[in-house]
Image (tube, rainbow, N blue to C red):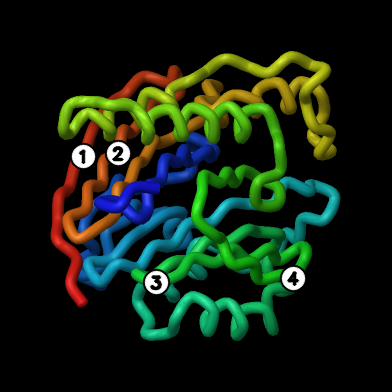
Amino acid sequence: MRKDAPLIVAANRDEWHRRAARGATWWPSHPSILAGQDLEARGTWLGVTRAGKFAAITNFREPSQTKSSAPSRGHLAVDYLSGQQSPREYLEELATRANEYNGFNLLLADQENMFCYSSVENKIEEVGPGIHGLSNRALDTPWPKVEIGRASMGAAIEAKMPEGALPERLLAILANDVRAPDAALPDTGVGLDWERKLSSALIVGADYGTRCSTIFIGGANSTFAEHTRDASGAIVSTAAFEFSSIA
């Protein structure tokens, strides 16, 4: 964490390539929201607002518990970003109906606080200062790519770099396609081949992989940048936004 940037985020969105999506933009339906959009269910995986709100959601990898009729989880992020509730207020209300959804982790923040909610544990956890990592398990579960990402983020934030160099450094962290050794892999019920594929920050695959890499440096003046990728992992488009927060 830095005084000029109280929130710094680097995140990859991994998804089936057949699922249509739109890259990050200001939403015509909610002009204060900057986010990508899933064009099937019309939700998002990560977004921010001009008023300093942030939301990101990840699936909880537990295939044996998947409910085929569950509603899309992407609306949970949109509902928070477009609403008036504080992070805790929103999560306390959500906790009463979270079992309707497949397992998820939801990170929410405003200009004062950040919270993480695990639907599997049904627990709201305040996220304190420091460098945290979230994949498809509980917050700060020490999967190899989470630990590598946290260490790399810490080094990037502490490094003395030219002004404006941090976004590219963070995007480079997200482009790490090195897989973890088998001995370090978790067992989440998807089989060894998939555990290997999913163990790197950047996932490359013909059917499933990293669809976009996004960084957000939030403060009085915020930076949001995104690289959209194809099935080979190559960058096919980029977007960058600079904006000032409003009270």
| Alpha carbon distance from label 1 to label 3 | 27 Å
* N-term mark: 4 or 3: 3
Look at the numbered disc 4 and give the secondary structure of its residue. loop
Say whether residue 185 is left or right of residue 47.
right
Identified at 42% across, 58% down, the residue is 44
Residue position marked by numbered label 1 in the rendering:
239
* Circle 2 crowding by C-alpha within 10 Å: few under 14, some 14–19, many from 20: many
- Tell me residue 133's x, y (percent): 57, 43
CB within 8 Å, label 1 to label 2: yes
53 or 190: nearer the viewer: 53
- Disc number lying in front (4 or 3): 3
* N-term mark: 1 or 4: 4
- Disc number lying in front (1 or 3): 3
Say whether residue 131 is left or right of residue 20.
right
CB within 8 Å, label 1 to label 3: no
Look at the numbered disc 3 and give the secondary structure of its residue. loop
Look at the numbered disc 1 and give the secondary structure of its residue. strand
- Tell me residue 3's x, y (percent): 30, 52
* Circle 3 crowding by C-alpha within 10 Å: few under 14, some 14–19, many from 20: few
Q: Which quadrant of the figure contains the C terminus?
A: bottom left
Residue 122 tag number: 4
